[in-house]
Image (cartoon, coloured by chain):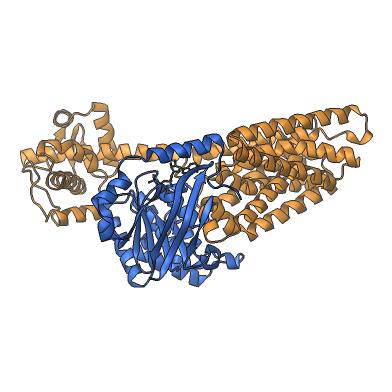
Amino acid sequence: MEVALETHNLTVSYNRRPVLWNIDFKIPVGQITGIIGPNGSGKTTLLKAIMGLVKPSSGYCKLFDQDLKQVRERISYVPQRESVDWDFPASVMDIVLMGRYKSSNLFKRINQSDRDIAVEALEKVNMLEFSNRQISQLSGGQQQRVFIARSLAQGADLYIMDEPFVGVDAATEEAILNLLTEMKNQGKTVIVVHHDLQTAKDYFDWIVLLNTRLVAVGPKDDIFREDLLQEAYGGKLNVLSKVGDLIKEKGFSVRERK
Amino acid sequence: MNDLLQFLSFSDPNVRFVTIGTMILGATAAMVGSFSFLRKKALVGDAIAHSILPGVCLAFMLSGSKDPLVLIVGAFITGWLSLIIIDGISRTTKLKNDAAIGIVLSVFFGFGILLLTSIQQSGNAAQSGLDKFLFGKAASLTQYDILVFSSIGIVLILVLLLFYKEFKLISFNPDYAKVIGLPVKFLEFILATITVLAVAVGIQAVGVVLMAALLITPASGARFWTHRLGTMIFIAMVFGAISGFFGSFISYVAPSMPTGPWVVMCLSFLTIGSIWFAPKRGMLAKYRVQHQNQQKILKENVLKLFYHIGEKENDFHAERSIEQLLKTRDLRPTELKKGLHLLKSENTVRNKDDKWLITAKGLNEAIRIIRLHRLWEMYLNQRLKLEPDHVHNDAEAIEHIITPEIERQLEKELNYPTKDPHQSIIPYIKE
Ligand SMILES: Nc1ncnc2c1ncn2[C@@H]1O[C@H](COP(=O)(O)OP(=O)(O)OP(=O)(O)O)[C@@H](O)[C@H]1O
Ligand SMILES: [Mg+2]
């Protein structure tokens, strides 16, 4: 199995309190993988750790068997829609063009070929007619599609999306899903955070079941088992969260320093 | 009046210098402040401004000179120091960011006032004029000062142009910028540095106390006029320049007045004006849209009256009295008359004294509205499975909103119905 993403013993904490414990899994190339778990189970945090936005207190992530720094241009990240202020003065086109910014050419102006790529991306998500629309005037589903278009404009190999199906209508949901399938057919890898169990089975090939710790990982048919789902979505892990509280209160760190 | 003319004629070269200089200062502050505004860091600008005072005083005490370059170095150091401390406090303690800002601001400013007082009491011959840093005094700037500050202002504008698209991204979505590998820390450092510099030169015109207004107010006013970042920054710069102009004018005609408060007055005026008069986003525009919607609803409702009576009596072209119209629908007489007169001006109804009748144009319009109403009722009934007696009120509101495209879509989805849920005919316009 060719590995797109590997996390190794990953532990992440906020203010010392661990919200992810010892996460250890591999995700294959060329599949649509769902990261599933209830609210607050650390899905967003996991993505942020993968994308280098929060520092793990221990462990590491590898993308295509390399550090993020070396493969940055092959990875594209779609943040949770609510993570930005949509009242920002910009048009849909402005946002999609951001997908063409590159760290390797900081002062390069946006040129015509960038624009063409952005137009193509907008077309794919069916938002071309809105390209001059102000982002403050978009519906939730349209905002989501703008974010996906920005990501497509990057032309990456691995797409990592945080809850792209939240707050979109059925038509948009289907459009996004078709897009993901199309990407998969082109050999791209897609990792999607999702919290709805009902739909997960239809959407994904692979599943990572998460609840503060890794519950299970594998092809979806292996994962959709009553006991595993119960484990992820059932009761809270009382001892684990109590220990987390203690770590925070007493000022310990998750790992002993050597 | 004479003052104004003399001022505007720029016959005095010093006036010319000071005016252009303060305009550049105002524009620069507004430009840099636009990003503080968008990044929701309005208070930080205030903290920097207040923290600059001790820097200016210390620079003066150590060097004994009022050379603006020396003072700016001092200003720059304490300005930056305040940023570092704010960041440190909110990162390492439980205090929230705004509390950290408040603490740093007041401690630095208090210390600055202390230094300023002791300088003034020291009897140093060169000290006179340092107090202008509190509330600003544009006219007391020398040509050399202006030259230095304007050059800095122009450099800041160039830096911003250079990093424009990166600053835009880190203001909108800093996480994304980090993920694609932009040097976000470095860009934030540059942005903070030009903010400190803009404040350090801007206080020459308005003083530390009111400097935050010069940073933030132009952007918040400009935001009302546009949805484009570039245009917003440009308008903010124009606002900043106008108030700079106004400030130097005041300073010139009323030399004992501090400039800052007047600059801020002018800015507030521009911003409040924007809140009211800006197209689309302004209060007046919103009010006008509401008013127009109400008029549209009234007109359409009155046209429907004619249709309903016509439908019942099987005669659409007869004259109707006010009483007859009022009986059909719950409308106040004054409203009805207003509606009729509005419609008359559009030639959709005519009157012979007290009798009113609908024109062919008006009838077409009425048919359109009735159609939309009944189509919508049909849609609610068939698609949302609402009972026929529950759909009327909803359709009353929606009929005024439906566009021709939606109308076509409705027809198609409902398979071109001819009757509504109450078995009334859905009328078509006969060509
Ligand atoms: N910046 C932060 N500081 C402190 N705690 C945080 C922070 N962000 C998240 N947390 C905590 O970490 C835990 C995991 O949060 P995370 O956002 O990763 O969950 P999630 O699975 O994405 O949830 P959701 O489905 O609601 O998006 C939660 O308990 C949350 O309260
Ligand atoms: Mg989340």
- Provide residue A107's location: percent of width, then percent of height: 62, 65
Q: The blue chain is which one?
A: A
Q: Nearer the viewer, residue B49 or B362?
A: B49
- Provide residue B128's location: percent of width, then percent of height: 88, 33
In the drawing, does residue B22 fall left or right of residue A140?
Answer: right
Q: In which quarter of the image is the C terminus of chain B?
A: bottom left
Q: Which chain is orange?
A: B
Which residue occupies the extreme front position in the image? Answer: A258
**In this rendering, is residue A108 above or below B90?**
below
Q: Which residue is drawn at 30% across and 60% down?
A: A204
Q: Quadrant of the N terminus of chain B?
A: top right
Q: How many marks?
A: 0
The reply to whether residue B230 is visible in this rendering is: no
Where ligand 1 lies, by image quadrant? top left
Q: Which of B215 and A247 is in front in this view?
A: A247
In the drawing, does residue B344 fall left or right of residue B280?
Answer: left
